[in-house]
Amino acid sequence: MKLNKKFSLLLIASTVFLSLSACSKPTHEGQTNKKLANHIALISDTNGIKDNSLNQSAWQGVKNYGTKNNLVEGNKGYNYFVPKDPQDYQATINKVLDNDFSTIIGVGYTLKPNIVKAAKSNPKKNFVLIDTHAAKIKNLASISFKNQEGAYLAGVAAAYTTKSHTVGLILGQNSKEMDSFKAGFTQGVTASSRKLHKHIKVMSKTVGNFSDINKAHDIAQEMYNQKADIIFQAAGKSGQGVFKAAKEVNQTNPVGQKVWVIGSDEDQTKLGNYQAKGGQPSNFTLTSVIKSADVAVEDLANQTAKGNFPGGKNLNYGLKNKGISLVQGNLSYHTWIKVQKAKQKIIDGKIKIMANR
């Protein structure tokens, strides 16, 4: 009888302990989920986060947000993931989901099909696509850029700088996004050449992807051999091949006979450093068209942390909201003034630029 009484008391004590444990558990989970709401993962394309281009800029935005909000870099705060190849996109997304990130950012339109699929399958996660338009899904937002506006200004800069009256354009691959670069650049060159009463030839070629540095080098080399003295490259990591080709040409000539490269996505001035014939240090990056992916990503992360994730929306950045810009770089003062006037006319709606050509 005493044994049964002791057993009963033990059972009651155990029940009370388990009840208290059960009551405390939801509070703990609530705190964890609150922290997870700030966890951000960035999935680059296959070129990684040191491409001197869009991936690098987007990752900088994630880092800026993470640092300012005291998150740790890694799977418990903010992190980046690089697929080995396009076939690895889905496996990379699955890896990110396994690490329980709450907001997942994919860079570039090549990731679009996989990100859209993941968003539909994981409605409680936030997904973001950069540099493309996304379908209207409640947990999917997209950040796009008016590439044609920056490309138009690059065309103005090229037209007012060229001495050979021949300029080149090298794109990563054929797509709607790349078409906007071609349309804007061609229109900018054409409009400026009319004002200058000159005929300026525009050569245009596509690499076929955003990672073939050697092929981009060969295309640029051919353009320089055909008298182009300025090439605007919008080719991701492939664009490094354009800088390589320009450097090879410029190292054999005096400073006054250089060919130029116009950079894209980030300020690529440093990629143009070289020594001219005779050993004189110089630089051949004429200017760069910048997409402020870092600013856009940080803005979106802040909105999300406040509970205002812009699901189902496309956030479009251009000259007017400072998502697109062009640096002065090595432009002459006269050319820079022409670029600034064109920029203001675009903002005011006095210059209409076609997104496709």
Image (spheres, rainbow, N blue to C red):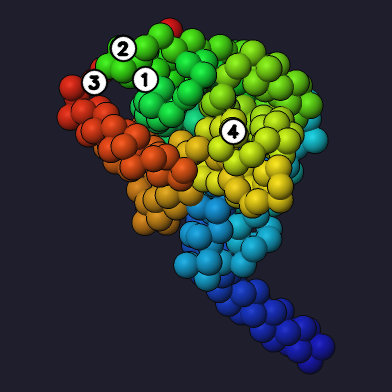
Say whether residue 176 is left or right of residue 53: left
Q: Position of residue 134 (x, y in %)?
A: 47, 25
Identify the amino acid type marked 4: Gln
Q: Position of residue 41 (x, y in %)?
A: 61, 49
Q: Earlier in the sequence, mark 1 or mark 3?
A: 1
State which mark lies toward you, 3 or 4.
4
Say whether residue 230 is left or right of residue 192: right
* Label 2, label 3: how far apart the Cα atoms are: 19 Å
Q: Are marks 4 and 2 in contact (CB under 8 Å)?
A: no
The kind of secondary structure element at disc 1 is helix
Instruction: Say which residue label 1 marks.
Output: 188
For image coordinates 39% across by 40% down, the residue present is 332
Instruction: Say which residue label 2 marks.
Output: 197
State which mark lies toward you, 2 or 3.
2
Tell me where residue 305 sits by quadrant.
bottom left
Query: How many neighbours does mark 1 have within 10 angstroms: few (below 14), some (14-19), or many (20 or more)?
Result: many
